[in-house]
Amino acid sequence: MSAPGEASHRGVELDAFRDALALWASGVAVVAVREEDRVLATTVASFMSASAEPPLVLIALGPGAQVLPYLPEGRSFGVSVLAESQGRTASVFADAFPVGASPFPAEGDPVIPDALVRMRCSVHATFPAGDHALVLGLVESVALSAGQPLIRWLRSYHRLVP
């Protein structure tokens, strides 16, 4: 970890870089894989559309993300875009050791049933990117619910005010 004021790359201070990115408002999603009788999941704010044809999404995962070792090419995974009432769920899976009852169904796709968007994907490719891995997922199914998204801004969760 860099000391305060230390340049991380080409004169950009790591703290200034993190502060700048905290000003970028984004939706919040939980990425999950089913591994035998359990679901491993991680909260991400770095999730985006990568292509419409074929339907691809891109997710950035840090080295400590629980799901990362379970995402080889071809592996199925779920993406749950969280609704505004799901801030607690986001916090649980942002933790390295999530505690509490699982919101995932006992069988089937590892998606949160009451999430705003539920996608089943398969790993199309994975790329190293600095201290993260970029996972490109081929979207195989999509289900939608009515509601507003949970937003991440200034290092905390917020509601979207239309």
Image (cartoon, rainbow, N blue to C red):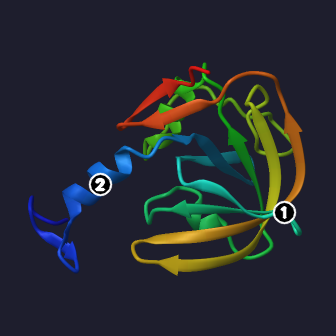
Q: Estimate the x, y position of residue 47 in percent, counting from the top left.
A: 61, 54
Q: Which mark is drawn over residue 18? A: 2
Q: Estimate the x, y position of residue 51 in percent, counting from the top left.
A: 78, 66
Label 2 SS? helix
Q: CA distance from mark 2 to mark 1?
A: 30 Å
Who comes first in sequence, dot 2 or dot 1?
2
Q: Nearer the viewer, residue 129 or 65?
A: 129
The answer to which image quadrant residue 100 occupies is top right
Q: Residue at x 53, y 71 (%)?
A: 133
The quarter of the picture where the N terminus appears is bottom left
Q: Is residue 128 left or right of residue 117?
A: left
Q: Which three-letter amino acid code belongs to the residue tagged 1?
A: Ala
Q: Estimate the x, y position of residue 16 in percent, counting from the top left.
A: 22, 56
Q: Is residue 54 left or right of residue 14?
A: right
Q: Which residue is mark 1?
A: 52
Label 1 SS? loop
Q: Which three-letter amino acid code belongs to the residue tagged 2?
A: Arg
**Number of other residues with Cα within 10 Å of mark 2, as a class: few under 14, some 14 to 19, many 20 or more:** few
Q: Estimate the x, y position of residue 129 in percent, counting from the top left.
A: 48, 77
**As drawn, 107 above or below 77:** above
Q: Nearer the viewer, residue 111 or 106?
A: 111
**As drawn, 36 above or below 101:** below
Q: Residue at x 59, y 58 (%)?
A: 67
The answer to which image quadrant residue 146 occupies is top right
